[in-house]
Amino acid sequence: KDAKVAPLTQKEEVGRATWMLLHTIAAQFPDEPTRQQKRDAKELMALISRLYPCKECADHFKEVLKANPVQAGSQAEFSQWLCYVHNVVNRSLGKTIFPCQRVNARWGRLDCPERLCDLEGANDIM
Ligand code: FAD
């Protein structure tokens, strides 16, 4: 018999979509970000912790950020940091821990023709 899969609640759907956006941003973050891009990454996470449309989640995430300040010195650093804090949230919800060495396989850069989706970093001023 087929196992029945419960439909996602709105809270779960928004969570999944938000993690997708955040991990995709981290996958596409430049290897050598500009100072502005590093600031933007920090600000984005701070804004999520204030405007996320679930107050208990936002409040919890503020604490997670306080204990784990954003690390966005490079693409690798930002995606590993995000994987780590997502796992902090996973643990608090009783979900399985994701192996962060697999983060690049799970979340890749968008494959746009002629690399039109790539962001410029500090080392490729056009
Ligand atoms: P999700 O956790 O949404 O993950 C989506 C996919 O990402 C997974 O299927 C997996 O392939 C991949 N993934 C999982 N872990 C990692 C990782 N560590 N690194 C990279 N990829 C990974 N819900 C609450 O009920 N209470 C909360 O306090 C709460 N806080 C949240 C805070 C934030 C900032 C966000 C974005 C969401 C929060 N949520 C919270 C929602 C919750 O985290 C889940 O998104 C939701 O429960 C749906 O879970 P899911 O099983 O579909 O997988």
Image: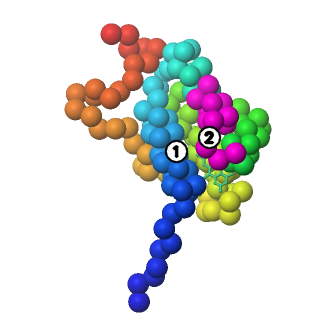
Amino acid type assigned to the residue bearing label 2 in the image: Tyr
Q: Are marks 1 and 2 in contact (CB under 8 Å)?
A: yes
- Asked whether residue 101 appears in the rendered view, the answer is no
SS at mark 1? helix
Q: Quadrant of residue 92?
A: bottom right
Mark 1 close to ligand 1, CB under 8 Å: yes
Q: What residue is pinned by disc 2? A: 52
Dominant SS type (magenta): helix
Magenta stretch holds residue 82: no
Q: Secondary structure at mark 2?
A: loop
Is 77 on the left-hand or right-hand side of 60? left
Residue 87 drawn at (x, y percent)? 64, 51
Q: Earlier in the sequence, mark 1 or mark 2?
A: 1
Mark 1 neighbour density, 10 Å: few (under 14) some (14–19) many (20 or more): some
Q: Residue at x 67, y 51 (%)?
A: 89
Q: Which residues are magenta?
A: 43-55
* Mark 2 C-beta to ligand 1 under 8 Å: yes
From the viewer's perspective, is residue 100 above or below residue 109? below
Q: Which residue is mark 1?
A: 18
The answer to whether residue 103 is above or below residue 5 is above
